[in-house]
Image (cartoon, coloured by chain):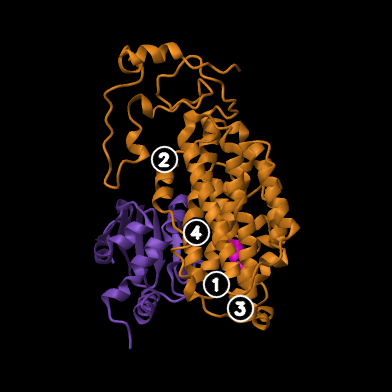
Amino acid sequence: MTLATADLEYLRRARRGEFDWGWLRNSRSEWGVKAVPSKVGLRLQDIMIGTYGVVPDHAPQRTMAPRGADIDPDVPDMGYTINDKAEVWSDNLLGLYEEAVSRQWSATRDIPWSELPELDPDIEHAMCQLSTVLSEVEMVASDFPAKWLWRINHDFVEAKMFLCTQVMDEARHTEVFRKRALANGGGLGKSKAVVERFLKLILDAETYDEGSALMHLLGEGIVLSLFRAGELLAPSPVEKKIFRLCMQDEARHVAYGTMHLRYRLERDPSLAEDYHSYLDKGEEIIGMLFTTPEVVEPTAMLAAGSVKAAEELGMAAADVLRARVIEEYLERCDHALLPRRARLTLPPELLVGVRGVEGKVA
Amino acid sequence: MVADARERRDVYNHLGFADFRLAVEVRDANATRHYGLVLDGYDALYAGELGDLAAFRPDAVIAGTPSTWQDMMDNIVGNGGADGTHTLNALSIAEDPLRVRSDDPLGRDKFFRYAETLQTLFDSLARSRPVAA
């Protein structure tokens, strides 16, 4: 590409008052549209009006020009690789973006860190180990969208904007759990290879479809359930607030992932087998996570309250929670038009108590 | 609760806007009653007792026995807000004693998307009733 040179002749004409005015007189973009704000302000939904509200199924150009603008014919090709709307869109996208912006919070300001009580050392250790795992896994949900953002055509800018909110949300989750690990005298715990393998599977996904299924639907669905469990098991109101605030963000990402997959499969049902194969791989690693001490035992300890009580309680609480996690994941798959009950690859021993998969239980 | 959302606008605005229709179900052996709560933007609206649950079009229903609801409210009033085992999430995560249900998993997930707003609203019961000595 050759860089254009500065149009000094124009500059000289303009100095004489001989302006071009082409942008004023000859624009081919739509004039006369007027968006009406809603009761909470001017939302994305409110500006989807006229031709500006038409999102093409296939982007005609690969440019950063705003959709609906009058675009120069010689704009450079940005090299986007995701140029079909169905690859990133979901019907709830605009509302989720607005909600994400409205419901941002600060891990510095909104968590009452000074109210953290001194905890029994084993409980503190459990909380720090759980925080270590969560601080580790949350950042992939920033890295993955960031890796794909620049490949998404600007005609789907609302999808890109939503993914930007996710990048920020997950950065904050990484921040808040790192802060929790360091705020009460415990510090960071162990990082396990099996966790990293799942993160690598997401990060190395060959397509956005694959990574989104693994991350938005499977991984974040499970983390959402883990946040719910964390809110129940948290040793003090400080952690409870952390988990509730994180839960809100994570549920938005899962809502996008579920509805995005549904949007995708409604338009091309032949992709279902591809998605099944992505989730086959993901579930295999999730099965390993469900049997990893550093992931399982902190919650068992927090549920029981001590090492001794945890040993007496065994996996009773964890089994109930895991069953709900898997049920919620399967319900989301159903809603996304990708029923997985017959296809589930998790080991039968992990499916005890899961409703709707009775034939697969050992 | 609704009055609290009106009076402490700064608190609820800070939590962000919401879009959620929640039916609270109180059921015992003899009767089942439903009450509607609507989060609309920054507003919380009480829809009253619902004669027709379906007509209310809830995103989710949270169901429990009268004694469960009473225990939760007593805990909130007694502690100035729910303690660790009496938050909406804590009581519903194992589907017992409260259960969140929805025909649509995204409707149920909205219960989590607005968790902090909902808990703040329910905890406000402590502001309208005296905290136990």
Q: Position of residue A216 (x, y in %)?
A: 57, 47
Three-letter code, disc 3? Ala
Instruction: Residue B32: name its quadrant.
Output: bottom left
Q: CA distance from mark 3 to mark 4?
A: 22 Å
Identity of the residue drawn at 60% across and 25% down: A79
A241 vs A19: above or below:
below
Marks 3 and 4, the one that precedes in the sequence:
4
Chain letter for the purple part: B
Q: Which residue is mark 3?
A: A304
A43 vs A51: above or below:
below
Chain letter for the orange part: A
Three-letter code, disc 1? Leu
Q: Can I make out residue B6 in this image?
A: yes
Instruction: Give the label, 2 or 3, closer to the camera.
Output: 2
Q: Which residue is mark 2?
A: A94
Three-letter code, disc 2? Leu
Q: Position of residue A263 (x, y in %)?
A: 51, 36
Instruction: Residue A193: name its quadrant.
Output: bottom right
Q: Which residue is mark 4?
A: A247
Q: CA distance from mark 2 to mark 4?
A: 20 Å
**Does the segment drawn in magenta span residue A170?**
no
For the C terminus of chain A, give its image quadrant: bottom right
* Circles 1 and 4 on the same chain: yes
Identity of the residue drawn at 52% across and 79% down: A117
Q: Which residue is mark 1?
A: A233
Q: What segment carries the magenta color?
A: A319-324
Label 3 neighbour load within 10 Å: few <14, some 14-19, many 20+ = some
